[in-house]
Image: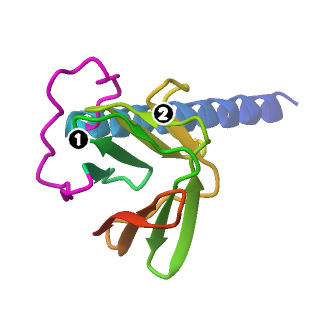
Amino acid sequence: MKKREEEMKEEMKRREEEMKEELKKEMTERKEFQAGHFEVSDHSQSVEPPRPPPNTQTSDSGFHIQVDQHGKCIRLMNSSTEDKHLGEWHLDLQVNNKTFMHRFDRSFYLRAGAFVNMWVKGYGPKRSNTDLVWKDLKPWCSGDRLKFSLYSHTGEMQYERSV
């Protein structure tokens, strides 16, 4: 009986260590993500739109997309000087040959110089005005081919980027 109790205690201790290690790994990934110019904050008060880092493709439409190296988040930025009403717009992400679509709520605005982080479900910080959950999106790997397409409510493509 004592041997069984000891085995159970050891198993519980092992599981606890695994959970701690997993939490530590997730926190490290978040810190690396934030250090890679993905820091979660509201830039809507910015006077000048942020300059896109090297891993961002620019466009005439004033949109930029950054991609999390761990495959768990996308950042859509409005680098124009005008607020953008993205109500009923949709962002398509093709990962290799599988397409995921996120439709923005009809009241969604992206202020000039601001961004929104779009997280894979189950990842990311608690909700804020700069974070959305893309419910059907799955994490991708560094070798996957990514293609982003942003469409207006009329179906006109506003932005496209391939990674």
* Residue 131: image tag: 2
The residue that appears at 36% across and 53% down in the rendered structure is: 70
> Circle 1 is placed at which residue position?
79
Where does residue 37 sit, x and y in percent of width and height? 21, 37
In the rendered view, does 4 fall on the left or right side of 89?
Answer: right
Q: Nearer the viewer, mark 1 or mark 2?
A: 1
Disc 2 marks which amino acid? Asp
Q: Nearer the viewer, residue 145 or 160?
A: 160
Q: Residue at x 49, y 64 (%)?
A: 92
Q: Residue at x 35, y 28 (%)?
A: 40
- Alpha-carbon span between mark 1 and mark 2: 17 Å
In the displayed structure, 39 sits above or below 88; it is: above
Amino acid type at mark 1:
Ser
Residue 50 in percent (x, y) is at 16, 34
Secondary structure of residue under mark 1: loop
Q: Give above or below for 49 relative to 140.
A: above
Q: Quadrant of residue 28?
A: top left
Q: Could you tell which of marks 1 and 2 lies nearer the N-terminus?
A: 1
- What's the mark number on residue 42? none
Q: Which residues are magenta?
A: 38-61
- Towards the viewer: 2 or 24: 24
Give the farthest residue toward the bottom.
Answer: 97
Q: Quadrant of the C terminus?
A: bottom left
- Quarter of the image containing the N terminus? top right
Q: Is residue 6 above or below residue 104?
A: above
Q: Is residue 159 left or right of residue 80?
A: right
